[in-house]
Image: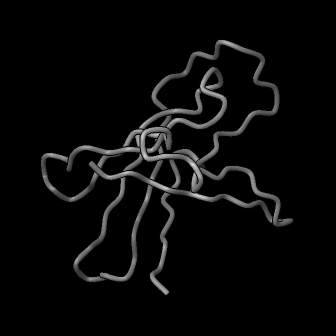
Amino acid sequence: MLVGRVKITNANGVVEYDNFTKPDTETKFTGFNFQKDLKAYLKDFSGDKSGCIDYGFFYMWIKPETPTQLGVNFHPDNDIVTQNCSNFQTTLPDNKIIHLTKQ
């Protein structure tokens, strides 16, 4: 099992989400398996507003030709909201590929 840690800040430096201080059992960001083709690792993610579809599947991959880049992609798991979600955005950008480069 992989446990994920993420800290998200907005353009003004305000922390929008941070699970670094949570114990491993409470990160809401865990994964257990590779996809069948072994090209991506699948993790479950749940943000702070789960009633607003802030949960789903998070894919991670590294291509052999770019070993210092990690690609990530988040797909919400549902499309039904159970609370007032005016102006809501998912914690992780949905359906967008993000490339993280090892420094």
Q: Quadrant of residue 48?
A: top right
Total marks in image: 0
Residue 93's spot in the image, x, y percent?
60, 49
Q: Residue at x 50, y 44 (%)?
A: 27
Above or below residue 90? Residue 11 is: below
Residue 44's spot in the image, x, y percent?
40, 39
Residue 75's spot in the image, x, y percent?
46, 40
Q: Residue at x 70, y 39 (%)?
A: 89
Report the residue that reaches farthest toward the right.
12
Report the residue that reaches farthest toward the left.
37
Above or below residue 68? Residue 18 is: above
Q: Nearer the viewer, residue 30 or 95?
A: 30
Above or below residue 66? Residue 33 is: above
Would residue 40 appear left or right of 90 to someone viewing this image?
left
Q: Nearer the viewer, residue 64 or 102?
A: 102
Q: Quadrant of residue 88?
A: top right
Q: Residue at x 26, y 83 (%)?
A: 65
Would residue 85 appear left or right of 73 to someone viewing this image?
right
Q: Nearer the viewer, residue 70 or 28?
A: 28
Report the residue that reaches farthest toward the bottom.
103
Q: Residue at x 48, y 59 (%)?
A: 97
Above or below residue 37? Residue 83 is: above
Residue 55's spot in the image, x, y percent?
52, 33
Q: Quadrant of residue 40?
A: bottom left
Image color mode: one colour
